[in-house]
Amino acid sequence: MEQTVNIKVKLNILEPNVGMKFSKTMEQYRLACNYVSEYLFNNNFPLNKNEVQKVIYNTIREKFNLKSQMAISCIRSVIARYKTVKTQMARRPYNYQDQNTGEWYREVRDLTWLHKPISFNRPQVDLQRNRDWSYLSSGQLSINTLDGRVKVDPICRGFNQYLDGTWKFGLAKLLKSSGKWYLHISATKEVTDFDKQAVKHVVGIDRGLRFLVTSYDEQGKTAFFDGQAIMRKRAKYQKLRAILQAKGTKSAKRRLKKLSGRENRWISDVNHCLSKTLVQKYGANTLFVLENLNGVSFERTDLPKALRNQNKSWAFYQLEQFLTYKAHLNNSEVVEVSAKYTSQRCPKCGVIKKDNRNHEKHEYHCDNCGYRSNDDRIGAMNIQLLGTQYISGQEQPKFELATNA
């Protein structure tokens, strides 16, 4: 199978006119994206690239002076964004209660629920490999603009590892962040398909707040990755954000924007380091088993108000994404299992009882067999068991609550 990664390359811009060419190209591309977005919104969301291209391709080229490939990339990018939003809306149906009967109903949402076209506010441009950008033998990057091609030097640690002939470069995105220019390059590599028969380790991973990750393997070994320092730092970000929002000045808003970018980069770095540590710890031929957290809330009412919002918004899905692609590059795999009863089930006797878990003490104590352990560890143990069942042939293993006959 193929595994794709996104390489973030900083560009060394020495001549001011190069930055001006980039800015002009990105702004015209942004305006073209908004034009395509309005067309989709006003024409009942046609998401077939070829059909849309037949109608507005020439208009885009004439109106925004885009190169031929850039015009095609613009249409493709906007349609891809709408498809992503469509998927996200379908996953989050609208729940409402009938005021007369009191019954709850669920309605699946689609793109018609949008009140206005998707807006493209950040200047950027998508570049096609060998058409709009290329890597030269001199080590420079050749990038196409509306005013011709320019050559720039890339600055990226470890970039040479992608030049060994096993990686295939694809689409790249040119953007500017904090006054610096970057090229985000998509690279694809053919990796070996995961073989269940060759599995050496089955690792259950419980994600949470007190411990970002608690892992449990087939040998009965547990590893805790503390999240207390993360929570404290996020609380500081939230406090500073509240102060700036209360001011409401232009300078405060600029500071908020920078603060948001800094926090997002820090969160990504934490998740990168955590996923890398897990992959290196267990090695190749490992099955990492995670809970499916769709619909699961991490809101904690037992915490101070200042800590609640930042706790329930940690990027757990991002951690899963990072762990997945790193696992694939290391001949390993990540699977999701049902989260039902994983924190309520005793891993020794199998009894499922919600009251056995003490949230305040972070302890699970089974009143049936007497087994006692950390509640996050209990979750990881049950998840690991579901992973073992998956290896044995159950495609969707899950725990069921026993019913009395």
Image: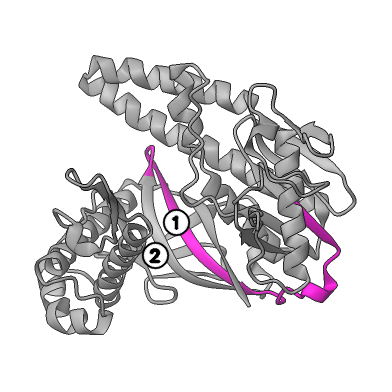
Q: Nearer the viewer, residue 300 or 202?
A: 300
The relative height of residue 134 versus residue 182 in the rendered view (above or below) is below
Q: Which residue: 32% across, 46% down?
A: 16
Q: Which residue is mark 2?
A: 143
Image x and y of residue 393, in percent: 74, 74
Q: CA distance from mark 2 to mark 1?
A: 10 Å
The relative height of residue 88 versus residue 373 in the rendered view (above or below) is below
Q: Nearer the viewer, residue 32 or 1?
A: 1
Image quadrant assignment for residue 99: top left
Q: Which residue: 23% across, 49% down?
A: 121
Q: Is residue 237 visible?
A: yes
Q: Nearer the viewer, mark 2 or mark 1?
A: 1
- Position of the N terminus, as image quadrant, is bottom right
Residue 183, numbered circle: 1
Q: Which residue: 58% across, 48% down?
A: 319
Q: Dot 2: few (<14), some (14–19), or many (≥20) neighbours within 10 Å?
A: many
Q: Is residue 78 one of those drawn in magenta?
A: no
Image x and y of residue 341, in percent: 63, 48
Whether label 2 touches label 1, CB < 8 Å: yes
Q: Which residue: 74% across, 63% down?
A: 330
Q: What secondary structure is marked by label 2?
A: strand
Residue type at mark 1?
Answer: Leu
* First along the sequence among labels 2 and 1: 2
Residue type at mark 2?
Answer: Ile
- Position of the C terminus, as image quadrant, is bottom right
Please state the total of marks drawn on the protein image: 2
- The answer to whether residue 32 is left or right of residue 398 is left
Q: How is the image coloured?
A: one colour
Image x and y of residue 32, in percent: 18, 63
Q: Which residues are magenta?
A: 177-204
